[in-house]
Image (tube, rainbow, N blue to C red):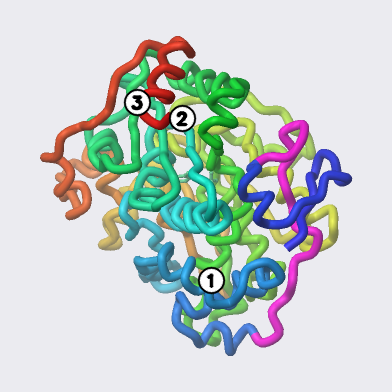
């Protein structure tokens, strides 16, 4: 797969380079030169999830990675299902939270880990990332136990939930977690300093594994096929997909799936009150406001970093702009949606609540709606319990790690401390 930098089209790379590099010059995103289409979508939809996913990814990556390697990567990455749960007559939830960290980010992070491991066979690399929770957990579990890769995850001391901390700071092995005496911005600044430091960048073969990595999006394309495959055949062309969005990676993947030939009628970009995109779709003006904290905090983003990729899909005529509408769901309606789902017998959480609300406002009689369940309700236990007034049980993954010991080291927020830690631990 050949890709180019959306900010500087003269920068062209293959998939392996794009995965290793993450971002292009001037922080530009990589975008495929061409997006292939699938000849016989119905035949593909009839296949099992992993076999089908290996075929989709093979079509995208086949010029660089042989078919057996692609299937091996898919089998290592996708070890949990993505079931479509019916919540009412014409509405379904695509449950993407059955992976080890109970959120959809497991799919992308695990496939990215497989890619990096495959493409850096002969050298030991170090993944360095800062997290305020979710991403760090997904990255830690995705890379855990991979031979030639060390992972260092920085997080702000006292600012992530105790359960969240247990989920990724108890693994050990090649996963090194560091609690920084500072806030999330301080953690991000340390990551940036490390990339600017030759001893660390070159000595430890540093890589960022961040959320704009193209490998994540391609992995996510596969579960949209899995969603449509589970619909009755007669309903497939009526599907409307509502994506609870923050950085808009998930929606980008949905739209790439459509570009490849997956029958999806239209898309809804659902956001909380951080509604830069819905306002832009309505007015044509891009004017981010300051970010506001909400119940659906993984979507508290006002300058979504994947948006240029969606623009590119329109600009290069892969898709018609009219296929996408936006909607903003405020805190009150998010709670109403979580309650309504509960009345329908479906325990959910605020992110999916936003997507469900936007979908139910917009769906027509002849359509079938799918909203994405991006996280397990237990991940947002406190909010869900507050909204519903009933306890939410911990799933096995969380219950199991609640008793484990946190293995993190603590450092102050100076770069000297991080550098000393990295060279001592990994050098
Ligand atoms: C990351 C995340 C989102 C937002 O996904 P994007 O791809 O950034 O739009 C939504 N819900 C949950 C639970 C998340 O963790």
Query: CA gap, disc 1 to disc 2?
Result: 30 Å
Q: Is residue 82 above or below residue 190?
A: below
Q: Nearer the viewer, residue 124 or 350?
A: 124
Q: Which mark is residue 415?
A: none
| Whether label 1 touches label 2, CB < 8 Å | no
- Say which of marks 1 and 2 sits in front: 1
Q: Quadrant of residue 155?
A: top left
- Say which of marks 3 and 2 sits in front: 3
Query: CA gap, disc 3 to disc 2?
Result: 9 Å
Residue at 48% from the left image edge and 16% from the top image edge: 186
From the image, tell me which residue sits under label 2. 130
First in sequence: mark 3 vs mark 2? 2
| Whether label 3 touches label 2, CB < 8 Å | no
Image quarter where the C terminus lies is top left
From the image, tell me which residue sits under label 1. 69
From the image, tell me which residue sits under label 3. 178
């Amino acid at each position: 797969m050949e890709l180019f930098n959306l900010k500087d089209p003269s920068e062209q790379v293959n998939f392996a380079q794009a995965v290793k590099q993450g971002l292009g010059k001037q922080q530009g995103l990589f975008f495929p030169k061409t997006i292939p289409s699938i000849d016989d979508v119905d035949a593909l939809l009839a296949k099992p999830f992993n076999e089908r996913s290996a075929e989709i990814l093979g079509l995208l990556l086949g010029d660089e990675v042989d078919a057996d390697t692609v299937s091996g990567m898919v089998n290592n990455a996708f070890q949990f299902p993505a079931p479509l749960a019916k919540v009412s007559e014409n509405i379904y939830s695509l449950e993407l939270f059955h992976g080890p960290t109970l959120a959809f980010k497991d799919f992308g992070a695990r496939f990215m880990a497989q890619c990096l491991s495959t493409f850096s066979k002969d050298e030991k690399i170090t993944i360095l990332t800062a997290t305020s929770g979710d991403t760090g957990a997904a990255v830690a579990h995705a890379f855990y136990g991979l031979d030639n890769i060390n992972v260092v995850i920085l997080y702000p001391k006292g600012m992530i939930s105790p359960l969240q901390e247990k989920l990724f700071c108890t693994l050990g092995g090649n996963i090194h977690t560091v609690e920084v005496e500072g806030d999330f911005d301080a953690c991000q600044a340390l990551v940036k300093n490390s990339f600017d430091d030759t001893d660390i960048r070159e000595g430890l073969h540093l890589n960022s594994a961040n959320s704009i990595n193209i490998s994540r999006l391609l992995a996510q394309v596969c579960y949209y096929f899995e969603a449509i495959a589970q619909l009755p055949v007669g309903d497939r062309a009526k599907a409307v997909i509502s994506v609870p969005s923050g950085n808009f990676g998930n929606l980008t993947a949905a739209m790439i799936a459509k570009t490849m030939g997956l029958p999806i009628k239209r898309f809804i970009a659902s956001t909380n009150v951080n509604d830069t995109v819905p306002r832009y779709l309505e007015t044509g003006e891009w004017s981010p406001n300051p970010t506001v904290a909400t119940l659906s905090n993984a979507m508290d983003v006002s300058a979504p970093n994947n948006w240029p990729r969606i623009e590119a899909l329109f600009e290069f005529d892969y898709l018609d702009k009219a296929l996408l509408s936006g909607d903003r769901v405020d805190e009150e309606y998010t709670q109403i949606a979580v309650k309504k789902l509960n009345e329908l017998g479906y325990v959910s959480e605020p992110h999916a609540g936003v997507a469900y609300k936007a979908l139910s406002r917009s769906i027509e009689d002849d359509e079938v709606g799918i909203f994405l369940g991006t996280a397990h309700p237990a991940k947002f236990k406190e909010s869900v319990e507050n909204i519903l007034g009933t306890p939410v049980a911990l799933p096995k993954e969380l219950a199991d790690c609640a008793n484990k010991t946190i293995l993190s080291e603590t450092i102050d927020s100076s770069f000297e401390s991080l550098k000393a830690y990295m060279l001592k631990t990994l050098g």
